[in-house]
Amino acid sequence: MKFPIDRFQSIRTPFYYYDLDLLSRTVAEAAAQTGDSRYHIHYALKANANPLVLAPIREAGWGVDCVSGNEVEAAVVNGFSPDSIVFAGVGKTDEEINYALGVGIGCFNVESLPELEVISELASARGVTAKVALRVNPDIDAHTHHYITTGLNENKFGIDLRMLDDVVDKALALPGIKLVGLHFHIGSQLTDMEPYRMLCDKINELQAHFAEKGITFSSINVGGGLGINYENPDADPIPDFKSYFEIFRENLELGENQQLHFELGRSIVAQCGSLISRVIYVKKGVEKQFAIIDAGMSDLLRPALYGAHHKIENISSPDAKEEVYDVVGPICESSDVFGKDEKLPALHRGSLVALRSAGAYGETMASRYNLRALPSSIAF
Ligand SMILES: *Cc1c(COP(=O)(O)O)cnc(C)c1O
């Protein structure tokens, strides 16, 4: 990636930089590769809720996947149509459910029987009908591939397969509710398509099972999770949407009048974003040297939270002779480390570095820990 470094010089670091051209090309490629008019993308807003990032996504006509009442509100405020909003999450409060009922969202992705009962009650009290999909835990082990897994039985997400028949019957019987479909989300940062193929098999099996009982669904939602190349972002600036959607086209049996929904977050916004930071000090130890930068885990939490690694680049002097650094933030936590033994062109006080692939789960996870300022953002 070519960084507009002249324009960076006057901006207070650290800040997020979003390459809107790459974002637009990513959105266009994902849209082009869906390849079926029954396929619909809902952008997972928790990945990045910056209005500058949301604009091209809204213009593509996509819906939004939300996991809190405030995210539903952010989607509405940013001009997304309420009926294109789906709302997941294991702990929706009464206040959040009432808010979503009030704006008339497209679908609640319901994660438990008690939640279903509360939505039924609150919708009935308002005299409205809530469209719901049941989030199923398909017991697919994406973890064997070291992914961040959400689709296993011991996980807090979704309804256990063994209880699904009962919950479906309940959903069909309760007032104030219209059961429209089944929802799945098996994990995040999946770069191998095999778990998605397994998911398709599972959905085919479930649809056949319910069809036998005379129950059909107008909507199937397969969640998100498509991964990106963190180690070499310039090799894959746009994820392989073709292979991703092909898996569903080739393996999922979808009826003429059934709609298939996707909730992509990371794969849409990760590669267009970088966290730009300045070296405060180069500190020489006995055996190591540290590049202490002005961004910390309060600005980009993923390394401290998941042991994730973002590619680090010296964008001030990319051609300087390489040296080895531990690249660390200023925060009083030992986990505030962005890279150990990083080979980088020589850094100096004032050098600018880019932490790449930071457009997803970067700015949205920022905090004010140590009473630091929240990072700012620019996009062009
Ligand atoms: C987080 C989340 C997503 C998006 O996941 P990505 O890995 O960013 O694509 C989709 N659906 C649900 C329910 C989620 O919680």
Image: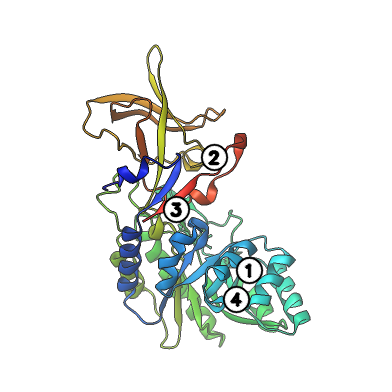
Quarter where residue 374 is shown: top right
Labels 1 and 3: the sequence-earlier one? 1
Residue type at mark 2: give it.
Answer: Ser
Count of marks placed on residues: 4
Nearest to the eye among marks 1 and 3: give it.
Answer: 3
The image quadrant that residue 254 belongs to is bottom left
CA separation, marks 1 and 3? 34 Å
Identify the amino acid type marked 4.
Answer: Ile
Q: Are marks 4 and 1 in contact (CB under 8 Å)?
A: no
Q: Nearer the viewer, residue 91 or 330?
A: 330
Q: Position of residue 53 (x, y in %)?
A: 44, 60
Distance from Cα at disc 2 to Cα at disc 3: 15 Å
Relative placement, left or right, of 241 versus 55 is left
The image quarter in which residue 195 lies: bottom left
Specify the amino acid type for callout 3: Ala
- Residue at the image point whose x is 40% and y is 67% from the top: 56
Question: Residue under circle 1?
Answer: 163
Q: Earlier in the sequence, mark 2 or mark 1?
A: 1
Residue 181: horizontal and vertical position, in percent? 54, 78
* Residue lying farthest to the top in this orientation: 286
Q: Report which residue position mark 4 lands on.
A: 105
Crowdedness near tag 4: few (<14), some (14–19) or many (≥20) residues, C-alpha within 10 Å: many
